Image: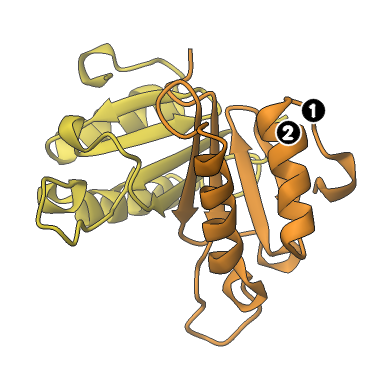
Chain colours: A yellow, B orange
Amino acid sequence: MSYYEKHVFFCTNIREDGGQCCSQHGAQEMRDYAKSRIKKLDLNGAGKIRINSAGCLDRCDEGPVLVVYPDAVWYTYVDKEDIDEIVDQHLVNGKVVERLKI
Amino acid sequence: MSYYEKHVFFCTNIREDGGQCCSQHGAQEMRDYAKSRIKKLDLNGAGKIRINSAGCLDRCDEGPVLVVYPDAVWYTYVDKEDIDEIVDQHLVNGKVVERLKI
């Protein structure tokens, strides 16, 4: 069994060469927002959900990206509404959000 | 199918309160070492293996820790020999290293 039922990694990398990267698209803010939503739902912790920052996930052209493990489902997102949908539909209810999947 | 066959996250967090954390145990150096080994083996990239840094994985007391997804197998490690074993046995050959598993 997975230590976290859903372990989410937001790419929050900042590229030093100035190239396209997730951090230019609000990645850190969206990660913080997701983390606070999970905490409010009291779903954070072992056996439940963990929201993490990660270094470059190397899918820059498709960014901003996040990945949900162990499901291995990748998403892109634009705003808090997208994050809400990923949280409510996938993390809480286990249903993949097809329109945001990459 | 998982975008990366094995996606590895090293906790490289630095705790600001001075408490025990993975970064005090060579996490960044070991992550860099694992990354360079995978590159030398030409196993980095989509469909293969990705070595990432991550923020606090919240298993500080068991640290330093890394996790291999989508397998959801967690390890602790001490030195490069441990990293070699995780790379050669688990990442390359798909066999869990029981002695380092947490």
Answer yes or no: do the residues labelled 1 and 2 have beta carbons within 8 Å? yes
B23 horizontally vs B54: left or right: right
The image shows residue A73, relative to residue A26, as above or below, that is above
Between A59 and A71, the residue placed more toward the observer is: A59
Q: Position of residue B93 (x, y in %)?
A: 73, 25
Between B90 and B76, the residue placed more toward the observer is: B90
Amino acid carrying mark 1 in the image: Lys
Instruction: Residue at 43%, 48% (x, y): give it.
Output: A51
Residue B98 in view, yes or no: yes
The residue that label 2 is drawn on is B90
Q: Position of residue A72 (x, y in %)?
A: 47, 24
Which residue is farthest right? B99
B4 horizontally vs B77: left or right: left
**Same subunit: marks 1 and 2:** yes
Question: Does dot 1 land on a helix, a strand or a loop?
Answer: loop
Between A96 and B20, the residue placed more toward the observer is: B20
Between A48 and B14, the residue placed more toward the observer is: B14
Provide the chain ID for the residue under circle 2: B
A44 horizontally vs B62: left or right: left
Q: Residues within 10 Å of mark 1 (few under 14, many from 20)?
A: few
Q: Position of residue A87 (x, y in %)?
A: 35, 33
Give the CA separation, mark 1 to mark 2. 5 Å
The residue that label 1 is drawn on is B95
Question: Does dot 2 land on a helix, a strand or a loop?
Answer: helix
Sequence-wise, the earlier of marks 1 and 2 is: 2
Amino acid carrying mark 2 in the image: His
